[in-house]
Each structure stands twice: as C-alpha cells, then as structure tokens.
Amino acid sequence: MPQMRSLMRGTCLALATACVACTASAGRAPPAPAPGGGASRAVVTVGSFNFPESVLLAYLYSGALAGKGYPVRVLPGLGTRELVDPALMAGLVQLVPEYTGSALEFASLGRVHATASVATTARALARSMAGRRLVTGRPAAAQDGNAIVVTGATAARYHLRTISDLARVAGRLVFGGPPECPERPYCLPGLRRVYGLRFRQFVPLDAGGPLTRQALAAGDIGAALLFTTDPAIRARHLVILADNRHLQPAENVVPLLQRATADRYGPRLLAALNAVSARLSTAVLAELDAQVQLGGRAPRAVAEKWLQAQGLVAAGRGLR
C-alpha cells in the first residue's frame, strides 16, 4: 500500500500547514460547558474541499455546532476529495460536508456504484461509511452534481441539447474541468463509457471555478464541467446539456462525521447537523452560493446570517 501511505503522509503535512494558516480565521465556540455533560472538549475540526460551495457548507455545519456550544474550528479549502476524505478516515479532521454519490464511489473504490435514487444512494453510503468508523448525517434535499456545460453560442451552432448530442462534435472540442477529471468515474471516464465521448483535448483547470468559466467564455474550451448549483450558469446564460443516459448519480449534501466524535458528544451533536440539512434545499444552496460567488461575500458571513435567520444560531453564538 505504498501509494496510500504516501497519500496519508501528504495529507498530514497539508493539514499541519493548514492548521497554522487558519489559526486566525478558525472559529471556536464560546467557553460554555460542553453539551452531553462531562464530555471532553476535544475540538471538532471541520474540513472542506477546495471550491466555494464546500467552504460555505463547512461554515454552515460548523456554525450550527458552535451555536450549540461545541468547540469547532474550520479548515477551509484543504484540497480535493483525494486529500480530504482520507484525512477524515484517519481522524485528522472530524467532519466533512460531502455529496452522497461521489463519496460512495470514492470510499468504495468504485466497487459500489451510486444511482440516481436519493434513498438508495444514501443507504449505501451509510453502510459503506459505517465500516470506516464514520457516521452519515441526514442527507439534505439540496443536490449539487456535475453539469456538462456549453455556451449558448456553441449550443446553437451544433444543435446541442443533451450530452448525447456532443458525440457528433466532441472530436472538435476541447473539454475543460478539474485536474482530477481524467480519473473521476463521473467525469471523463464516465463520459467515454456512457456516451462514447472523446474530446480533441482535455485542459485541467479548476473545480467548477473562475478559471473554467473564463476559459469557456473566451472560447479556449468548447465544453466544461461545472456544478449544477453554480450561479454563474444562469447569470452568464450558459447551457447545461441534459444527462439523458443518467450518468450522474444522486449528489445530496451530507455531513460525514467521525464515529469517535459522535460517540464523545452524543446524539445532540448529530441532531444539530441534521437541523441544517433539514432546511437546505437546492434552491436555498444556489442562493447562498450566489451571495458568495457573485456577490463577493465571505462564506462565513453568509453562513452565519442564514443560520440566524433559520433560528439555528442565536446572535453572538456563532464561530468566533
């Protein structure tokens, strides 16, 4: 297992660096007695992936915990799933907001395939994570999956409405997306397997971020992988091609928590996380994303305002 050992060494180093870098911005709850009576006040470290929505979700879940008096800190933007999920499994972070389908494929090493069924995918994820000493919280109604996107001009020029339509022209188009796309089952491998797509070239950019959107707008790439809740899709009149062969699975937002942390603090901690998920729809998540990505507001501030509006956090009881 030399690759796994190397990955975990890299994970430890990255997280150690992140801990130093985030000290000023990481939040801790007020010094109230820890919920659950007598439980150790071990800090719950919440990690996120390296794209804005994941950072926002980390602040939503951590803010809800802080509001209930749990000691919390946030390590935002740690990296890709290949870095963050092994860190969670090793206990280097205790909580990560995930997406059901992608998390299941990653944790099972592709042996268990997610489907478009929300309930089936969530149950399979819970079973898979239980064997890794992880607990899944309540999946939110909010979903954010991969979207294959083109500009309106490209869609009109090639008469594109579905991903299947790309088969006629993929050999003439450059495809842009996250650097890990060639290895991800729902990115290039899935597009080849399910749709037979072979693009002229793949350009590694960012995870649904500004580099990808800029390259698409400039014509440097002809098609791109973005995320379905990306507010720029509507704002820039981009076209999401219909996934007519159902490659993409259910991708409900779900908190993943170390079993040891759940046991230490008891059921009220998981209940605080589930209360966030219960109020988080796709429309709500897209609106919060817009405030961050288009409005330029800090994810932490957006999360705190929403939590207060939902009655999940009292004023002054969020992250400090």
Image: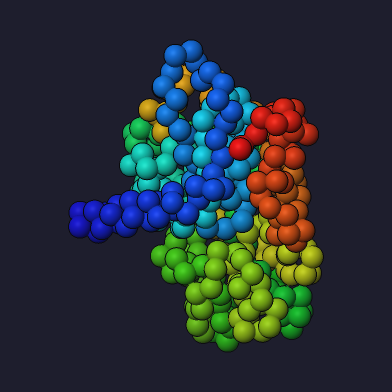
Labels in figure, total? 0
Does residue 292 appear to the left or right of 38 in the view shown?
Answer: right
Q: Is residue 51 above or below residue 306?
A: below
Residue 248 image position (x, y, % from top left): 56, 55
| Colour pattern of the rendering | rainbow
Residue at 50% in and 78% down:
202
Nearer to us in this view, 43 or 309: 43
Does residue 133 appear to the left or right of 41 in the view shown?
Answer: left
Query: If the image is split into quadrants, where does the N terminus sit?
Result: bottom left
Furthest toward the bottom, the residue is 172
Furthest toward the left, the residue is 2
Residue at 45% in and 25% down:
41
Query: If the image is split into quadrants, where does the C terminus sit?
Result: top right
Nearer to us in this view, 152 or 63: 63
Is there any visible trace of residue 83 in the rendered image? Answer: no
Does residue 221 appear to the left or right of 90 in the view shown?
Answer: right
Residue at 36% in and 48% down:
86
Residue 294 image position (x, y, % from top left): 75, 61
Q: Is residue 63 above or below residue 251?
A: above
Is there any visible trace of residue 229 in the rendered image? Answer: yes
Residue 180 image position (x, y, % from top left): 45, 66
Residue at 56% in and 40% down:
27
Q: Quadrant of residue 225?
A: bottom right
Residue 14 image position (x, y, % from top left): 38, 56
Nearer to us in this view, 37 or 184: 37
